[in-house]
Amino acid sequence: MSGSRLLLLRCRAADGRAFWLLPGGGREPGESEAECVRREVREEAGVDIVVGSVLYEIPADPPDGTYASLRTYHGKITRGEPRPGGGEGTEELTAVRWLALDRPEAWEPELQADPFLFPQLLRIRAALRFPQLSLNVAAG
């Protein structure tokens, strides 16, 4: 995250689905949380960061045993330009982009419809004390 901008990664799954996500992943044995965040961002986005405070923490949903909770951190790039890194398993990271957190009216419908990322974006905005959004949602 840089100011009111958030770094997102484009992921393509083996079945062809594509979606945006935040850089991140799980800790390796003996690794601190800050070390994990720095490593994951370096691997996935090709940049070095200073890890700041935790913006929020939520229980993993659904709790499948992989993660007990999910934490999102504030960070600042100290070296490098964002670029997509590798991938894990059958997923491939294909692009990076900056999302203006202060301009949700400019967010694409794809982001607003994403059942995983969109709630994260709202939690990040709330943690950074942006005004709440008023959204028109069509009933299906």
Image (spheres, grey):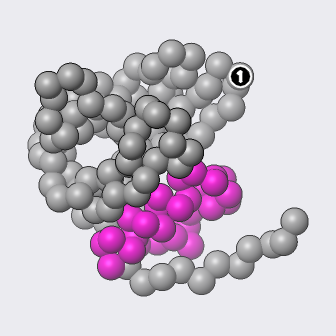
Specify the quadrant of the image occupied by residue 56: bottom left
Q: What residue sits 15% from the left and 55% below the top?
A: 52
4, 72: nearer the viewer: 72
Which residue corresponds to the image point at 68% horizontal and 31% vertical from the top-left? Answer: 17
- Report the quarter where the C terminus lies: bottom right
31 left or right of 28 in image: left
Please tell me whether residue 47 belongs to the stretch shown in magenta.
no
Residue 82 x %, y %? 31, 36
73 in relation to 134, above or below = above
Task: Name the quadrant of the N terminus.
Answer: bottom left
Say which amino acid is labelled 1: Asp
Of 52 and 10, nearer the camera is 52
Determine the residue positioned at 33% across, 71% down: 127
The residue lying furthest to the right in this view is: 140
What is the residue that sits farthest to the top in this orientation? 89
For the stretch drawn in magenta, the main secondary structure is helix
Question: Which residue lies under the disc numbered 1?
Answer: 15
**What residue appears at the point 55 percent right and 59 percent down from the top-left corner?**
118
Do we see residue 108 in this rendering? Answer: no
- Lateral position of residue 11 relative to residue 24, left or right: right
Q: Is residue 41 visible in the rendered structure shown here?
A: yes
Which of 96/50 is in front?
50
How packed mark 1 is, by other alpha carbons closer than 10 Å (few <14, some 14-19, many 20 or more), is few
Within the magenta stretch, is there residue 114? yes
Q: Residue 96, relative to residue 106: is it above or below?
A: above
Residue segment shown in magenta? 101-129
User: Where's residue 139, x and y in %?
Assistant: 84, 71
**SS for callout 1:** loop
Q: Position of residue 107 (x, y in %)?
A: 56, 63
The x and y percentages for residue 73 are 26, 53
